[in-house]
Image: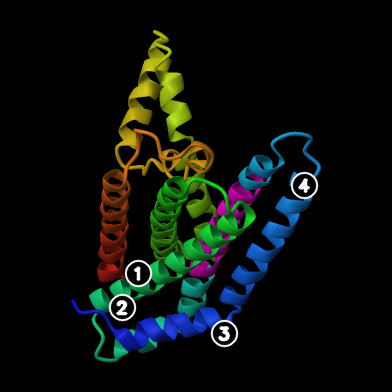
């Protein structure tokens, strides 16, 4: 169950070939420019307004770029029979999947670094502890998202379907806090209780991305809530869960 370093390098070269890194740089530059332009129109607290706008915009742009690259790369590999060719060589299915997960996670870390750097450039006077926590949690979130994209692109036969499924999971994970808050209102209708039970069950297997990369950390510091232990634990647990599910599907798949 070893990782194939040549395969990891091949995937990273594919990202360069597909202009992913160039697009990432242009996204950061464009995000900074738009944030500074819009922030300059604010009457008060223009720097904080610029910071919030840049952080939110670049945050979700990074998510979109990562999930699209991962899904379309995997589906293209299936359509061109690259997967069949690689698995016909002395490469186990475990190594194939783990190598892709490692390469995609590296891309997630690179993306998080560019986004955090762009946010730091926009507002150089912000709290460094908050920026550090925000950047680390952003990297963890990106790793979860791109491994979710890997899973869905393996089990869904179309690129559009895989991208939509990953986006749906991401939206649900970002809204899970609000959904659980609504459930705590305590309605007593039977249909409501049934739906509440279903949502509580789903919340056990859905990452709490609403607790990750909070913009308030950039403005007011990390506070006393979420820490690095929660961030690393959630990243490890849900990434392992996604990889295991994708591996089960790959082992059962007939080529």
| Mark seen at residue 38 | 4
Q: CA distance from mark 2 to mark 3?
A: 20 Å
- The magenta region covers 53-71
Q: Residue at x 56, y 56 (%)?
A: 120
Q: Which residue is mark 2?
A: 96
Q: Is residue 69 magenta?
A: yes
90 left or right of 173 in image? left
Q: Please, what secondary structure does the residue beneath circle 1 have?
A: helix
114 left or right of 101 in image? right
Q: CA distance from mark 1 to mark 3?
A: 19 Å
Which image quadrant: the N terminus? bottom left
Mark with earlier residue (1, 3): 3
Q: CA distance from mark 2 to mark 1?
A: 9 Å
Q: From where the camera sits, is residue 254 visible? A: no
| Mark seen at residue 101 | 1
Considering only vertical position in the picture, is 98 above or below 173? below
Q: Please, what secondary structure does the residue beneath circle 4 have?
A: helix
Q: Please, what secondary structure does the residue beneath circle 3 have?
A: helix
Q: Which residue is mark 3?
A: 17
């Amino acid at each position: 169950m070893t990782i194939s370093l040549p395969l990891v390098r091949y995937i990273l070269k594919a990202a360069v070939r597909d202009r992913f890194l160039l697009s990432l740089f242009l996204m950061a530059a464009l995000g900074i420019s738009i944030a500074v332009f819009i922030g300059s129109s604010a009457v008060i607290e223009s720097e904080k307004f610029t910071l919030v706008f840049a952080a939110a915009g670049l945050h979700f742009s990074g998510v979109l770029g990562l999930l699209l690259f991962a899904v379309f790369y995997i589906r293209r590999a299936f359509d061109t029979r690259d997967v069949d060719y690689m698995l016909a060589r002395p490469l186990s299915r475990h190594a194939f999947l783990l190598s892709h997960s490692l390469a995609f996670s590296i891309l997630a870390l690179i993306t998080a670094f560019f986004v955090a750097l762009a946010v730091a450039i926009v507002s150089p006077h912000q709290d460094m502890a908050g920026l550090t926590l925000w950047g680390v949690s952003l990297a963890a979130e990106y790793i979860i998202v791109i491994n979710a994209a890997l899973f869905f692109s393996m089990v869904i036969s179309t690129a559009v379907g895989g991208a939509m499924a990953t986006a749906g999971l991401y939206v649900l994970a970002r809204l899970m806090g609000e959904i659980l808050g609504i459930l705590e209102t305590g309605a007593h209708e039977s249909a409501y209780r049934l739906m509440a039970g279903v949502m509580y069950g789903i919340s056990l297997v859905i990452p709490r991305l609403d607790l990750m990369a909070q913009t308030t950390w950039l403005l007011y510091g990390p506070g006393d809530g979420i820490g690095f232990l929660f961030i690393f634990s959630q990243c490890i647990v849900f990434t392992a869960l996604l990889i295991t599910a994708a591996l089960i599907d790959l082992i059962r798949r007939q080529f």
